[in-house]
């Protein structure tokens, strides 16, 4: 059974960079042609796609966040990562990592999510 | 950017009754539409993809329909575990992008 687990600091200071890692178990990031993605959800609000990455490293980002986002993959560790720079309180959210299906049309496996609070 | 609008924001239904949730796209998304269920403190769970295909393990009481800009999620006979927030999500072919509706909260009447 495929499992995804987010990890990283739960508290980030304003103007700094938020960094999260998603560890995939029960399957290899590089063994199949899947995309992997990050989605966030501010407290009490809806879902926002941040960006996606292919195991080869090809990336696609939400245009509204593109200037601040970097997603990378480390196939040797079976992980992919998110960096969001110049954070503000508006970036406070639960951050989810997820797998996109083979057609890359929907998210079929999700991590449990991790709350990141931006505060001094 | 394609905007997804869900209605109603909150739907109150009694157990055993039918619930109908709507999702409208600002432009055609063909059948590139998925539905998710989210319970408090949990990650979203995929219910429907391709507008009408149930995901693995999803009960038959959940059904999706629609194409283009108008989509519907129907829960035929509500069980207690179905009360949650439901999100629709569209996929844009190029450049690849995904947008979610704002959600419909399905509550017990």
Image: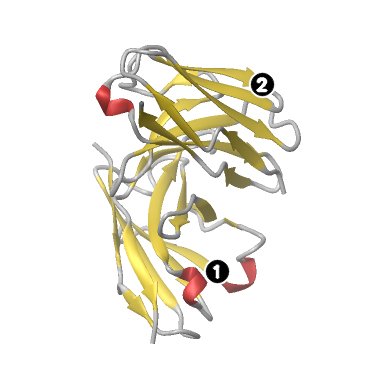
In front here: A81 or B29? B29
For mark 1, what is the residue? Answer: A69
- Chain letter for the residue marked with disc 2 in the picture: B
Quarter occupied by the N terminus of chain A: top left
In front here: A5 or A27? A5
Disc 1 crowd rating (10 Å Cα; few below 14, some 14-19, many 20+) is: some
Q: Identify the residue at image location x=46%, y=30%.
A: B11
Q: Residue furthest right?
A: B27
Left of B95 or right of it: where is B43? left
Q: Is residue A74 visible?
A: no
- B36 w.r.t. A29: above or below: above
- B17 w.r.t. A16: above or below: above
Q: Identify the residue at image location x=58%, y=35%.
A: B6
Secondary structure, mark 2, is strand
Secondary structure, mark 1, is strand
Q: Identify the residue at image location x=55%, y=33%.
A: B8
Give the colour scheme shown: secondary structure
Q: Is residue B75 visible?
A: yes
* Residue B21: percent from left, percent from top: 52, 25
Q: CA distance from mark 1 to mark 2?
A: 32 Å
Quadrant of residue B79 within the rendered picture? top left
For mark 2, what is the residue? Answer: B67
In front here: A52 or B22? B22
* Residue B93: percent from left, percent from top: 68, 39
Left of A19 or right of it: where is B27? right
Quadrant of residue A76 within the rendered picture? bottom left
Same chain for marks 1 and 2? no
- A6 w.r.t. B5: above or below: below
């Amino acid at each position: 059974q495929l499992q995804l687990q987010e990890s990283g600091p739960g508290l980030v200071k304003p103007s700094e960079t938020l960094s999260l890692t998603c560890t995939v178990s029960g399957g290899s990031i590089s063994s199949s042609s899947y995309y992997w993605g990050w989605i966030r959800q501010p407290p009490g609000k809806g879902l926002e796609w941040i960006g996606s990455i292919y195991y080869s490293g090809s990336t696609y980002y939400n245009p509204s966040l593109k200037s601040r986002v970097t997603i990378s993959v480390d196939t040797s560790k079976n992980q992919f990562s998110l960096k969001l720079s110049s954070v503000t309180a508006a970036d406070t959210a639960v951050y989810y990592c997820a797998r996109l299906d083979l057609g890359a049309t929907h998210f079929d496996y999700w991590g449990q999510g991790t709350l990141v609070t931006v505060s001094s | 950017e394609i905007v997804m609008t869900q209605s109603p924001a909150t739907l109150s239904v009694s157990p055993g009754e039918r619930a109908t949730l709507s999702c409208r796209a600002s432009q055609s998304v063909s059948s590139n539409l998925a539905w998710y269920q989210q319970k408090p403190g949990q990650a979203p769970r995929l219910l429907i993809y391709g507008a009408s295909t149930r995901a693995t393990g999803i009960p038959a009481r959940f059904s999706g329909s629609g194409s283009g800009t108008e989509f519907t999620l129907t829960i035929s006979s509500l069980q207690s575990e179905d009360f949650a927030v439901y999100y629709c999500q569209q996929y844009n072919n190029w450049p690849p992008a995904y947008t979610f509706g704002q959600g419909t909260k399905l509550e017990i009447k």
